[in-house]
Image: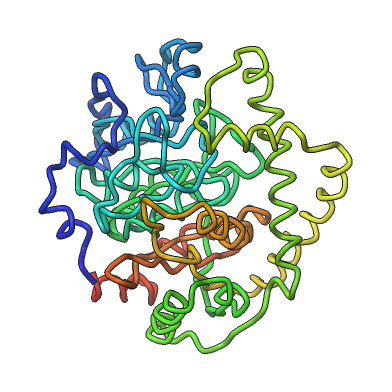
Amino acid sequence: MTSPETAANAMNAADIGAFVSGPRANLMPTGSGQLSGLSFAVKDLFDVAGSVTGGGNPDWRRTHQAAARSAPAVETLLAAGARLTGKTITDELAFSLEGVNAHEGTPLNPACPERIPGGSSSGSAAAVAAGLVDFALGTDTGGSVRVPASFCGVFGFRPTHDAITLTGVIPFAPSYDTVGWLARDMATLASVGDVLLPPLPSTPVRRLLLVRDAFALADQPVAAVLRAACEALGVTDEITLFDGREHEWLECYRVLQGAEIWRELGPWITSTGPQFGPAIAPRFADAAAITAAEVARCSPLRAELAAHVRAALEDGVALVLPTAPCIALRKDAAAAEIGAFYPRALTLTSIAGHAGDPQITLPVALVDRCPAGLSIIASANQDRALLALDTPWAKSMRTTS
């Protein structure tokens, strides 16, 4: 497939709109190590010493002070030799999968410029895809690294929940929030993981299972090319995971995520009265309306769904599914098309979210000249097994990139 670098060659890097406005955050390495010589950017939810963490919203920026120190994840990367070269645009307080920010603009998708980059780690994905940095940090709650990675044609990783500290990161829905990252190649993706992840032993993935009802949520052309990629990896066995309960997976995520969002951000919203973009304001209003009864109903359901995922991942099994249900939406997509995208996308991303499991997304294919990502989910704390460079998927990506 055409690499993001090739797609980006024809465009002016200064015009892709990946970075927040104003002076560019720039921190030199504090040490040397595995990431020496590499550059990175961070989503504007991460504290960077001396900069205000803007969260994609001018009122958040206005009501907060410059960070006294960088988030530990950022400090760890600097200590390993990487150089920070900027903060990237995010959807407002991370509440979107589109990458459209009413205040700061929409970063260009270098892989297919007429389409959105995906969010909420939109700027991070765009900067990586355009070759402006070697890798970038994002956050992933309901797909905010995975979806833009798929849309922009780069590698993305969501780690096991709580594997990497979220200290110094604006909270969203803490029981789902993770620090994730993006890169243009597996080697860099794995190197970042080596630095950020705890040094836990991992067991190699022994068997890959295609999730049939997850593929059923994808557009037919996307499902077809991703099934072909699975065949190339030797994936022959299939299972069902949702078992006709897709709505419950989605509703459980909507309720529990929304309740946590309002718990974390509601007091600030209530006291400040911030101005949100027209697509974002109703989402916070919906979060505010979630009741204690809904949470009480969905909390045990989440435990049940997580146990179901854990059972499917026993004995070295990993699950294979589409990262997103479609290629990147056009910038002028109708509201109905956007509305149809969200339930399918969030149902797919809820698998790893409910269970707290690691997920890698691979830029394996093109549909209508736009990227489509394939994901692999492993059991908790098996992050390094997904990132290992001797896996069939890593070897496959070396031959197709």
| Left or right side of 301 for 288 | left
Q: Which of 361 and 208 is in front in this view?
A: 361
Is residue 367 among the parts visible in the rendering? yes
Residue 95 placement (x, y as % from top left): 54, 38
| Left or right side of 261 for 102 | left
**Quadrant including the N terminus:** bottom left
- Image quarter of residue 27: top left
| Left or right side of 287 for 71 | left
Query: With respect to residue 147, does 62 lie above or below?
Result: above
Is residue 318 among the parts visible in the rendering? no
Q: How is the image coloured?
A: rainbow
Query: With respect to residue 28, does 384 lie above or below?
Result: below
Residue 347 placement (x, y as % from top left): 63, 61
Q: Which residue is drawn at 45% across and 37% down?
A: 91
Q: Which residue is drawn at 27% across and 58% down?
A: 112
- Image quarter of residue 127: top left
Q: Which residue is drawn at 26% across and 20% down?
A: 22
Q: Nearer the viewer, residue 40 or 329?
A: 329
Q: Which residue is drawn at 60% across and 58% down?
A: 352
Query: With respect to residue 323, does 367 lie above or below?
Result: below
Residue 45 placement (x, y as % from top left): 46, 30
**Quadrant including the C terminus:** bottom left
Residue 183 placement (x, y as % from top left): 31, 52
| Left or right side of 361 for 300 | right
- Say how many tags the image has: 0
Query: With respect to residue 251, does 51 lie above or below?
Result: above
Q: Which of 281 and 249 is in front in this view?
A: 281
